[in-house]
Image (tube, helix red, strand yellow):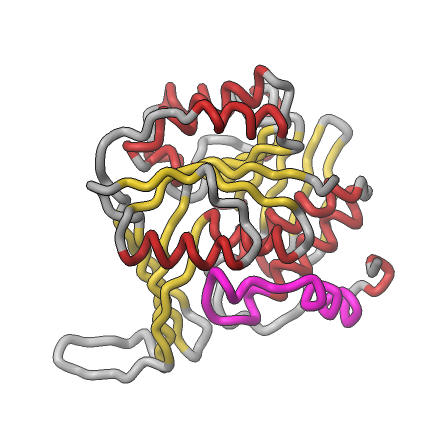
Amino acid sequence: MPFRVVTVGDLVADLVVQLPSLQVAPGVYQEAHSISIEPGGAGNFLIAGARLGVRMIAIGVLGDDVFGREVGRILHDEGVEMSLVARSAEGGTTAVLVMNDDAGQTLMTGAYGVGTEVAFDPRWAQAIADADAVFAFGYSLREARVRRAVLTSLQLARQHGRPVYFDPGPEFRLLDAALRHQVLTLVDVLLLTADEVVALGADTPAAFLGLGIRRVVVKRGAAGCSIVDAHGDHDAPGAPVVVRDVAGAGDCFAAAYLFGVAQGWPDTRIAAVANAMGAAMVQRRGTGRHAPTLDDVRAVLAAWQPEYLW
């Protein structure tokens, strides 16, 4: 049976605009190369995981609007299980404007969807109980209508002994300190950037282990990643590639990390494959359906660390 990953929240519509230059100015028209709607946030993670052969199951909410319907359609077409996603008729879909230019610069801004609080669906409890891993994002806890359902999901995962993977993202630090602490005590594996380690008040990644977190994975971009647990630290170098767009790279990295866990690989191979996935993603422009395939990841490894090919 395929490894089952349940994602909780962070269903986002990215409006992806590819421009010649980000030097935009009032009154100056600049023709874009392309504009598209793509699944963002957890959508990057879900698509990347599905393309690697992992069974990806989404829990969360989308607005019953143009953005929500398009994101739902794309994710379904990519093989993501969407039957547990609630539809909010009165509130819109969380949306992010992602602008990227020919120089590899990326700018993002967005607005959270609003509406009535989403009630916890009893079917979600069964999906969590049956999962091999539960993955949540800090952005979900900033979306008021789904916050309580996300927290309940993490608590249920802990009760059922399902490993919780958590990526706080840059906005997690804006939450109330008590809520941040409560969430982190429910986490088994924490994935975050070096900047986010500092933003959350930790001197070192190992400081999070004191909260009961079993493993900390630090994403270091071009420098690769570090895995920290009770046995020590493991640093894995990044692949030397040309960066065209950083949007979604961390989400795709996380999907490849879970793929490696599903294979039962040692940390060295998991880290190499996750880094290769991130390197494949940053060479592309755009999110969602621009996520790398299994062949893309293998191509990076073949040119960089062929000893980790499988």
Q: Residue at x 48, y 28 (%)?
A: 124
Q: Position of residue 3 (x, y in %)?
A: 70, 40
- Read off the magenta span: 281-304
Viewer-side residue, 31 vs 25: 31
Q: Nearer the viewer, residue 114 or 164?
A: 114
Residue 36, horizontal then vertical, whole percent: 37, 69
Name the residue at the top extreme: 159
Position in image of residue 62 (x %, y %):
34, 45
Q: Quadrant of the C terminus?
A: bottom right
Residue 169 versus residue 95 in the image, above or below: above
Residue at the right extreme, as displayed: 307
Residue 191 located within the stretch drawn in magenta: no
User: In which quadrant will I find the N terminus?
Assistant: top right
Please report the residue visible at 77 percent of the width from the left and 72 percent of the height from the top.
303
| Residue located farthest toward the left when viewing the structure as drawn | 27
Residue 197 in view in this figure: no
Q: Is residue 287 magenta?
A: yes
Foreground residue, 284 or 228? 284
Q: What is the magenta segment's predominant secondary structure?
A: helix
86 horizontally vs 128: left or right: left
Q: Residue at x 73, y 46 (%)?
A: 260
The tally of labels here is 0
Asked whether the viewer can see residue 109, the reply is yes
**Residue displayed at 61% across by 52% down:** 50
The relative height of residue 131 versus residue 265 in the rendered view (above or below) is above
Image coordinates for residue 256, horizontal then vertical, percent: 66, 51
